[in-house]
Amino acid sequence: MPDGPAALIRRFYAARQAGDTEALRAFLAPGVDWVEPDVGGHMGRLRGADAVLDMIRRAGQATGGTFRLAVAETVETSTHCAALVTWSAERGGRTIRGRELAVFGVADGRIASARFHPENIADDRAFWGEAPSAP
């Protein structure tokens, strides 16, 4: 399915790497429900395209533009895409690399929902300068 959810997600990540944050708006439903792990002071539950774009801008600023993401693998249905995303960033002299499972809901050719499941949340918290949370 070349125009299915997986193709949309791959195009979204390619556009994100191109650096034009505002161009990403076309990929997002206006009321997108986006849930990132609550780390870094710029993530958590985000509602609406403006909130998602702001989070992407702030992540880029916090890492001096070093934040890089790539879709490694995808699996899709007609309404969802699960993507294994690899990423890296630098901040405060520290480099981090990770993987996460991202699950996107797609409606009307746009991302309507997104949920991110990191491989190692403790590394994420340390990178953003946060103390580990209690289990």
Image (tube, helix red, strand yellow):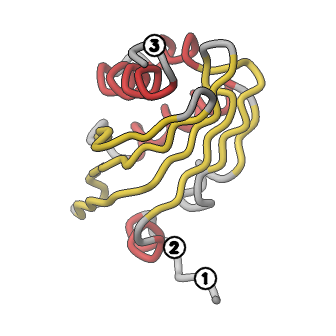
Q: Amino acid at mark 1?
A: Ser
Nearer to us of marks 1 and 2 is 1
Q: Amino acid at mark 3?
A: Asp
Q: Is residue 5 above or below residue 130?
A: above
Nearer to us of marks 3 and 1 is 3
Dot 1: within a 10 Å radius of its alpha carbon, few (fewer than 14), some, or many (20 or more) residues? few
Q: Is residue 78 left or right of residue 85?
A: right
Residue 76 marker? none
| Image coords of residue 113 (percent x, y) | 67, 36
Q: Is residue 89 above or below residue 108?
A: below
Q: Which residue is mark 1?
A: 133
Residue sitting at x 30%, y 49%: 87
Q: Which residue is mark 2?
A: 130
Q: Quadrant of the N terminus?
A: top left
Asked if labels 1 and 3 touch by Cβ distance under 8 angstroms, the answer is no
Residue 31 vs residue 89, the one in the foreground: 31
N-term-proximal mark, 3 vs 2: 3
Q: Is residue 11 left or right of residue 94?
A: right
Disc 3 versus disc 2: distance between alpha carbons?
A: 40 Å
Residue 3 marker? 3
| Image coords of residue 106 (percent x, y) | 63, 26
| Image coords of residue 33 (percent x, y) | 73, 37
Residue sitting at x 67%, y 32%: 51
N-term-proximal mark, 3 vs 1: 3
Which structural element holds mark 1?
Answer: loop
Q: Quadrant of the C terminus?
A: bottom right
Dot 3: within a 10 Å radius of its alpha carbon, few (fewer than 14), some, or many (20 or more) residues? few
Disc 3 versus disc 1: distance between alpha carbons?
A: 40 Å
Q: Is residue 117 left or right of residue 106?
A: left
